Image (spheres, rainbow, N blue to C red):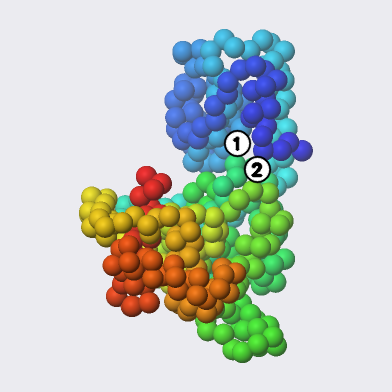
Amino acid sequence: MLSMPWKEQLEQVLNCPLRTARISVVAWHEAAREEQAAQVRPTGRIELADGRTWYAIAADSRSVDVLEVPAERLTMKEQRLLEWTIQQLSVEREAVPEAEPHLEELGQWVQEQLDAGIHQPDMPERLTAGGRLFSDMIPFLLMSEQATSLSLYGELEKLLSSFFEEEVMLIPLKEQEWLILGPTALLSDADQEERTDGPEETQEELLASMCSGLHGMLASEWVGECHLAVAEPMTPAKSIVETVGLLRETIYLGRRFYVGDNIHLPWRLHLERLLGSVPEAQRARFMNQILSQSDVLLEQEFLTTLETFFSLDCNVSETAKKLYIHRNTLLYRLDKLKQETGLDVRVFSDAVLVKILLLLYKVTKRM
């Protein structure tokens, strides 16, 4: 079985740069100068007018994944090797389960609505999975940072089935991005498990715990980095597009403001969502005003202290314990901060200003 760095491996063996692309079936047929029905799945290769060659790796009724070889770069033996490799890829793809056609169509429809800026469209009846999408479901959005492999969908489907022990829907969206819809019964199951170990948790806490467990499983069983977001239960037939938009924004904001985090929860990013919409010039002006007296806030010692202080709800004793410092040492730092900047983070209004400043600093220092 071929692993996903197959293109890079071929480039090394052939000593030739290769390019992959996805084109429409119509473009393939036009390049081939053949009049075939759009339902016919393209295979083989096409020699383009400029000398480049397209090899069909995979295809469906709408698009073709092609491997492009530069003009006059391969010998006859190398061409045969490449063609044999393509055949092996085709065999592997046929052996791997793909998304059901109606799920692929649903994912394409969701993407089309988002691209058009339509966030609450009426879902066509044919896409409601026989009415299943009129029931409340829990939405997870998964983004992978690894290159897509031919077996990725099948592997992911198996992992999800074993993790949830409930039937879930896996909807492919963009490349390396999937929407997972699970039944609300998952919340009841999670609640029963948590009750045996401690006090009753809120719905948000249960969803966060579920998301954390799912990410842990994917991180250990799946090769590569991934990001995961979850939202509260919704009715897909009515709000799937709006929910996907929310979860995408959540992952974007989480990765932007909290580098290193892989689990992103929309109810924890309200302030970040607001600040992300502020124009860059206004953000810079605000920071300059606050830091006009001193930039001691941005020293690493103070950054770490303040991050910990805010994460523990401004509790001085708990912050000192977390930082492994004496309580008086922490108070000294906070007093010095007040002396240098005029801001006392033990006062609510000043704490809000400093919190906003730190969030903006995270964004601006990476621009």
At 73% from the left and 45% from the top, the residue drawn is 95
Q: Position of residue 59 (x, y in %)?
A: 57, 37
Q: Toward which corner of the image does residue 324 lie, by quadrant? A: bottom right
Q: Could one spot residue 186 in this view of the protein?
A: yes
Please name the amino acid that badge 1 sits on: Ala
Which amino acid lies under the numbered mark 2 shown in the image of this protein?
Leu
Whole-percent x, y for residue 17 in the image: 58, 20
* Of the pair 37 and 68, the residue shown nearer to us: 68
User: Is the C terminus in the top left, top right, bottom left or bottom right quadrant?
Assistant: top left
Q: Position of residue 3 (x, y in %)?
A: 71, 38
Label ID, residue 58: 1
Of the 4 image quadrants, the one containing the N terminus is top right
Question: Which residue lies at the image location 54% right of the left edge and 26% below the top edge?
Answer: 19
The one nearer the camera, 97 or 213, is 213
Which residue does the numbered mark 2 point to in the structure image? 150
Few, some or many residues within 10 Å of mark 2 (<14, 14–19, 20+): many
Who's the residue at 67% across and 22% down the image? 12
Label 1 or label 2, whichever comes before in sequence order = 1
Q: Nearer the viewer, mark 1 or mark 2?
A: 2
* CB contact under 8 Å: marks 1 and 2: yes
Quarter location, residue 278: bottom left
Classify mark 1: helix, strand or loop: strand
Within-10-Å neighbours for mark 1: few <14, some 14–19, many 20+: many
Left or right: residue 87 compared with residue 116: right
Q: State whether residue 123 appears in this view.
A: no
The residue at the far right in this view is 1
Residue 38 versus residue 131: which sits nearer the camera? 131
How many labels sit on residues? Answer: 2
Q: Nearer the viewer, residue 135 or 173?
A: 173
Q: Is residue 24 left or right of residue 352?
A: right
